[in-house]
Image: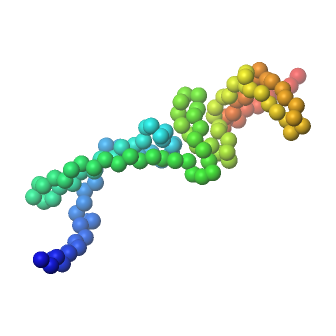
Amino acid sequence: WPAAAATTVDITSRLVTTYLSAISTSAPTSDDNPYIIAYDCSDVSGNKASTVRRRVYVNCVSPEHVCTGNNGQLTCSTSGICLGISLSLDSLSLTSSTGSTSSSSSSISSSTSSSSSSSS
């Protein structure tokens, strides 16, 4: 049997979109915790299609990378630097361009807030 001619109908104006909450793109998602979007569809006669689920991952714009803050919240680096986190250098070994090695027991704190210091 010859195939019947396909008919294309634009139903865009008849689509109804509802959602519980919007996807936030202000922070990246981890590989094990993406947003899950579920799609449902039915026609005017009430015939329902199977629910389809999609995983949505929010990534940092290249060349930036994912940073984990002190509270576990994910953010994107700015100019390659993770801001708003504290790093402990207790067990960090630093090597200079001359090859000498030194150890440090200090800590670095980086944040976007301004601070002032005074000397006496």
Toward the left, the furthest residue is 45
Residue 90 versus residue 65 in the image, above or below = above
Residue displayed at 73% across by 21% down: 90
Residue 31 is situated, as x and y percent measured from the top left of the image, at 47, 40
Q: Residue at x 63, y 51 (%)?
A: 63
In the rendered view of the protein, which quadrant contains the N terminus? bottom left
Lateral position of residue 53 relative to residue 114, left or right: left
Q: Is residue 109 left or right of residue 53?
A: right
Whole-percent x, y for residue 66 in the image: 58, 41
Numbered marks: total:
0
Q: Is residue 19 visible?
A: no
State the quadrant of the C terminus: top right
**Image position of 85 (left or right of 100):** left
Where 101 sits versus 75, above or below?
Answer: above
Of all residues, the one furthest to the front in this rendering is 1
Residue visible at 53% across and 30% down in the picture: 72
Residue 18, how many percent across, how many down? 28, 50
Residue 71: x %, y % from top left: 55, 28
- The answer to which of 7 and 115 lies nearer the viewer is 7
Q: How is the image coloured?
A: rainbow
Residue 42 visible from this viewpoint: yes
Relative horizontal placement of residue 112, taking residue 73 as reference (left or right)? right
User: Quadrant of residue 12 in the image?
Assistant: bottom left
Name the residue: 80% across, 30% down: 94
